[in-house]
Image (tube, helix red, strand yellow):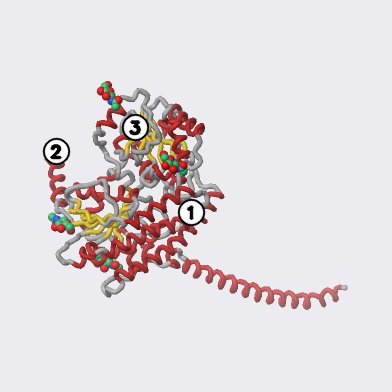
Amino acid sequence: MSPKTLFTLFLAAFLINVSQSANILAVFSCAAPSHLIVEISMAKVLAENGHNVTVITTLQPHVSHKNINLIYIPLSKEEQQSRDSLLAGMVERDNSNMLVTVFRMRKESLFLFNKNRNVMKDPRVQDLYKNKDNKFDLVMLGYYLNSFQIGIAQKLKVPVVIATSLFQSSIFNIFLGDIGKQAYVPSMFISVEKGRTMTFAQRLINYLSLSALKMNMYLTEKDNAEAYNELYGSDPAMPKYEDLNKNVSLIFFNSHALSEGPISPSFPVAIDVGGIQIKEKPDPLPSEIGDFIENATHGVILLSLGTHVKGTFLKNDTVNRMFNVLSKLEQRVIWKWENLDKIPGKSENILYSKWLPQDDILAHPKIRLFINHAGRGGITESQFHGKPMLSLPVFGDQPANANKMVKDGFGLSMSLLTLEEQPFHDKIKEVLENPKYTQKVKAFSKLFRDRPLTARQSVLYWTEYVLRHHGAPHLQSPLVHMGFIAANNLDVYALLLSLLIVFLFISKEVVKRLYRKLSVLAARKEFVEKPKKLKTK
Ligand SMILES: *[C@@H]1O[C@H](CO)[C@@H](O)[C@H](O)[C@H]1NC(C)=O
Ligand SMILES: *[C@@H]1O[C@H](CO)[C@@H](O)[C@H](O)[C@H]1NC(C)=O
Ligand SMILES: *[C@@H]1O[C@H](CO)[C@@H](O)[C@H](O)[C@H]1NC(C)=O
Ligand SMILES: *[C@@H]1O[C@H](CO)[C@@H](O)[C@H](O)[C@H]1NC(C)=O
């Protein structure tokens, strides 16, 4: 048999094996666009490969497909208002104190948590398991501190995999187990240059911030247990909340540790699919944007401050300063701006747009700089396409993301809240004119893309793996099933310590008795010898 026919046969066998389409329920109810974009990219891969995916969301996704059935439970007017004021409030504050930030995160994630809880009470969602005509094979849960939602997988009696827009961190210890990596795996609050280990001060901060995060997780888990009991507690067939986290088959992380770091011991249930939201081949650009880029003679700058920091949340002064600098550049600028009736100013070289195909734009060779708010999605896209950056972080994880990006050498960063014209201008010029940023980010791009399976192939392969084997409990770390004492070997240490103490006690007794005996002997000898001495005198 020629290799070619062998390959065809192999391919056919592979296709037959996976050709059965599965019914997958995706719970992506976290009302934050940055989460939904990543999560729904995973659902789209499954839909494109013939699976029937039912997606629960609270935001209107930008992605659609004939195999995606949407259960859309939008934010009410009040919810929308409270979200907007929450976000506007966040922009004003200083986020330099890491402990304060951790606990503020909790307060802010409470809004998302309550929406998640309400979603699970929605009749359309409850019908999914109450109506016996519905058949599901798998639940995919978008994770952001919402493990009580795993309950729906137990109701349906199907395996559950987690899709998250986050990277691996200690908040996933509830699924992975905690093996005390604080000494050498930096948390999101610390950025360490490639190839360096943490200094003493960094390890101290790492330890303290992880401890704060642990306390935060403790409270979050209490909220989760309460929500779980409220929703599912009355059903005696349901497991206890404490056992719920032990039943997660896989976690898809939005990271790629091999290129991004941090390097740490990994678990087989953790699958890195960083960059999943990025198209492997860009779509053609809308003609207005495409022409604008093509006609630029000095390259193009893309400016987008993300979905959270809407243009209108910014202070007028800041916007004016940015406009003054950008309108005087020889480069063209594409500026993402929500309110086209109130643009920052008119200029030949600036194109405002309400919505941008950011990924497709960044793929264009004429893009020379990406000015962003240091959201993880944007930074990842820029890294994938090898474009240098100027980050203007505002809140949450943004300052830390920007810090890491700068340490990696992919660009520069400055606070949006204290932006002044001269430094803004100087930093743009520096990143445009000094080739070192582009070289570094292009080298990274190659490393980031070099994988045995692409992000999309990984999602498909591993999801179908769980489907084929009806769950993957065999991949789980034993740590998940161990108590604190066993997981940290405290009982072994206690036994060895007691043995040591007993040994020391016995040794001491033996030595004491021996000494006493010897002393007695010595005394006797002296007694015997003394008269001799007397005699000789
Ligand atoms: C796909 O899922 C939807 C929603 O659960 C269901 O109504 C539909 O029958 C499913 N389609 C197939 C082909 O299984
Ligand atoms: C874990 O999930 C399986 C279905 O995949 C179910 O049969 C089992 O009861 C669950 N175990 C626990 C402890 O929830
Ligand atoms: C770009 O240039 C082409 C011809 O070179 C012209 O037809 C078109 O109007 C220009 N578009 C823009 C947006 O400047
Ligand atoms: C900012 O400018 C807009 C008009 O562009 C105006 O309506 C608004 O009151 C200004 N806000 C402040 C704080 O000056």
Residue type at mark 2? Lys
Q: Which residue is drawn at 28% across and 71% down?
A: 238
518 or 174, which is in the foreground? 174
Q: Mark 3 points at which residue?
A: 351
Element on which disc 3 rests: strand
- Residue 317 drawn above or below residue 128: above
Q: Which quadrant would residue 277 be assigned to in this image? A: top left
Element on which disc 1 rests: helix
Q: Position of residue 486 (x, y in %)?
A: 43, 67
Relative to 380, 13 lies left or right: left
Residue type at mark 1? Thr
Q: Where is residue 513 in the image (x, y as percent from the top left)?
A: 65, 76
Distance between the Cα atoms at labels 3 and 2? 51 Å
Q: Which residue is drawn at 24% across and 34% down?
A: 284
Q: Which quadrant would residue 344 be assigned to in this image? A: top left
Q: Which quadrant would residue 76 be assigned to in this image? A: bottom left
Dot 1 surroundings within 10 Å: few (below 14), some, or many (20 or more)?
A: some
Image-quarter location of ligand 3 = top left
